[in-house]
Image (cartoon, coloured by chain):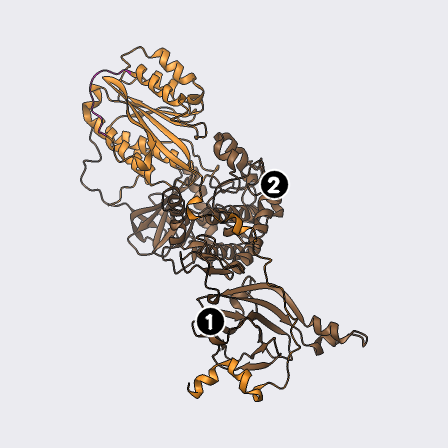
Chain colours: A orange, B brown
Amino acid sequence: MGFAKYQEDIVSRYVGDFAMRPTQSPVSPPKAPTPNTKNQSDQRTKKMSSLKKFAVATPRPLPVIVLADASGSMGENGKIEALNAAMKDMVSTFAKESRLRAEIQVGLITFGGKAQMHLPLAAAHSVAGFAELKAEGVTPMGAAFDLARQLLEDKDRIPSRAYRPVLILLSDGQPTDDWEVPFKALCDSERAQKATRLAMAIGPDADEAMLRDFANDAEAPIFKAHNARDIHRFFRAVTMSVTTRTASQNPDLSTTFVVPPPDDDALDLDFQ
Amino acid sequence: MSTTTAEAPKKNRTVLDQHGQSYELTGRIGEGGQGIVCTTNYPNVLVKVARATTEEKRASWTNKIRALMRQPLEGLPIAHPLALITQPQPGYVMELMDGLAPMTELMQVATDSLMSDDGLSGYVKTGGLLRRLKMLARLARVLAQLHGRGLAYGDLSPANVFASQSLEYAEVWLIDADNVASQSRDGQQGVFTPDYGAPEILRGETGINTLTDSWSFAVMAYRILTLVHPLKGDVVLEGAPEREEAALRGELPWVDHPVDRSNALSIGLPREITLNAPLRALFERCFNAGLNSPGERPSLSEWADAFEAATGHCDQCESCGSTFFYTPKQTCPFCDHAQDKSRTILLQEYRYMPPDLLREGLTEDVPESLIRKECWTRTGKALVLSVSPAELKTLPLGTSLYADASPLCTVQLAKDGLWIEPSAGARISLQRASDDKVVAVARRQRLKSESRSGVSFWLHLGAVEEEHVVWRFNW
């Protein structure tokens, strides 16, 4: 060991070099001070668990159920294509949303020829994709209402801890089955009453009176779509009203469901 | 009728600011009830476009932003309006660095990982406990400075706080300064983010103020550290959404209430390992007494002090890489690994008052033994020294002036020993408790690893004849 290195070691000086003691010394420190355990918990070792034992809360489901007209008439003027694309956009936006507070779930009931659960209610981020809707057949809306009511009342599929659902009904024509009783049963069911219900009338032939009865937001009358682009705008507004439920809220600014006018739609941004 | 999806690619939208500068909007980074934040063709320049639907609301929003541009936000890491966007919709231009992500992302990664088979790896790979403490310390300090300027932030939530994606940094930036308000504007704005709004805002009793900021900060901090919400106990999580609303309005006790266990929580990361005692005490004050008495909540500078102090109490596990609060047992609470005890030493702060100074003004009958005992005062501050070097200053970590305090020396624990390096002009000496021997440390020197035997040492940061700081440790 060289001399310089020897000098670096303070302890070695204690041993050999008394000459370096300063002339004035501080008072002897208190002996055997208690170790600082005050800031520490002593029960932690008992509670200690292996990594896998930690659990976190599963997010509360927020069901969004779409009842979509897929009857033959939807095949005209690109309506069904617009609906497919708009649904896909909505699901992918939902999939990207934070799941810390709510898990947005999407279900799609279609009525075209027959009523069916086209996309069973599932977490948006787990939906890999769904079969494109095809416009065919009659408009069995009554049967679709029954399916929707069964889904809403099924506590296995929608547990009681779920946030109040969002129900969306869109149609371009008149129901072809016996719809009044199922419609009333759906609208009167406890969960559907709590739900946010939005409706879109596509084109001039839609049953606007019935859609108006379905929608329950006094400030958001039914939305009338005149073209395929309007279908997109409606779904954008639906997406926004669902996602902003968990985002910042400001009572000063209206958060009611409003579809922005097309010419003034600065927020309707498509990025390249 | 045509579909939009089949159309040829559209051009990006361009907006104009009040000076005629144009910005091409290139992507969307955030969206809320009040507007949408977009990236632009300029690096680090963002544009927020308002979601105001009527002429009247646009005018009022523009006025608000104009007022905000006059607020004293300089020097704080808050992205604030630099210019107003006038065409085609009202908005504003702000600056924000690249490579940042909202803190929701870090929470989501950690939560998803625990819900899958990956367990805690998501928590660790987003920086673990220490980085979280550092970010929260920084956030609390920024908010404390904002409050010190007479302003409240307003809509504090992890979506509005951005942190560097690189794990080496724990800096934070706040975006969405729209709601920053002077406290005199109480009751005007009830803006909040669900889960983070103070109960009195949810009940519609007040608008935003520094006390609601304090609430939102505490909820955010608790969630970031423990991954659970302080008001959502088992009964709330299992119950209907109405019960959650009631809990958020302050109608149920908080999950760690010391006596009332009616809303206790059985999940989340154990508070015993994610919070130290001072932090637990602050959370208890905020969520128990402060639940419905906003004045009881800790101030942001109290939070900042506690979080800064906590950043000095962490050790890193050699096995799993987690950072954790030091205990004398030196066992990693995340994986049960027993640490090599020589890797870490605990330093405790004392203040030393020379007996001559103490004697001043005292009568002759005060016994010498009492004076000698009173020379030493333990401050309760501690510092855990492991792999990274630590700077010892005139003030310890966890005091608001620490950042500006002058450094006295740097200590570093290396394989070959404990290195002590005095700062320029500082008078440092080391005293060995066993025999009271004292040596001056005039340059970078070390205590050898070989000589380590558990003896107490006292590191004096100052002239022995003056009052000064002393750090005690065992070597």
Where is residue B147 shown, x and y percent of the image?
Answer: 55, 54
What separation in Å lies between label 2 and label 1 (alpha carbons)?
A: 46 Å
Label of residue B188 in the image: none
What secondary structure predominates along the stretch shown in magenta? loop
The three-letter amino acid code for the residue at tag 2 is Asn
Q: Is residue A180 above or below residue B356?
A: above
Q: Nearer the viewer, mark 2 or mark 1?
A: 1
Residue corresponding to mark 2 = B292
Contact (Cβ within 8 Å) of mark 2 with mark 1 = no
Q: Residues within 10 Å of mark 2 (few under 14, many from 20)?
A: some
Residue range highlighted in magenta: A131-140
Tell me which chain the residue with mark 2 is part of.
B
Residue A234 lies in magenta, yes or no? no
Asked which secondary structure carries label 2, the reply is: helix
Residue corresponding to mark 1 = B412
Residue B69 seen: yes
Closer-to-camera residue (B42/B127): B127
Left or right: B307 as drawn, with respect to B18:
right
Which residue is pictured at 60% across the width and 72% down the height?
A: B469
Q: Is residue A23 above or below residue B389?
A: below
Earlier in the chain: of badge 2 and badge 1, it is 2
Q: Residues within 10 Å of mark 1 (few under 14, many from 20)?
A: some
Where is residue A31 shown, x and y percent of the image?
Answer: 65, 71
Closer-to-camera residue (B171/B358): B358
Asked which secondary structure carries label 1, the reply is: strand
Residue A138 lies in magenta, yes or no? yes
Tell me which chain the residue with mark 1 is part of.
B
Residue A260 seen: no
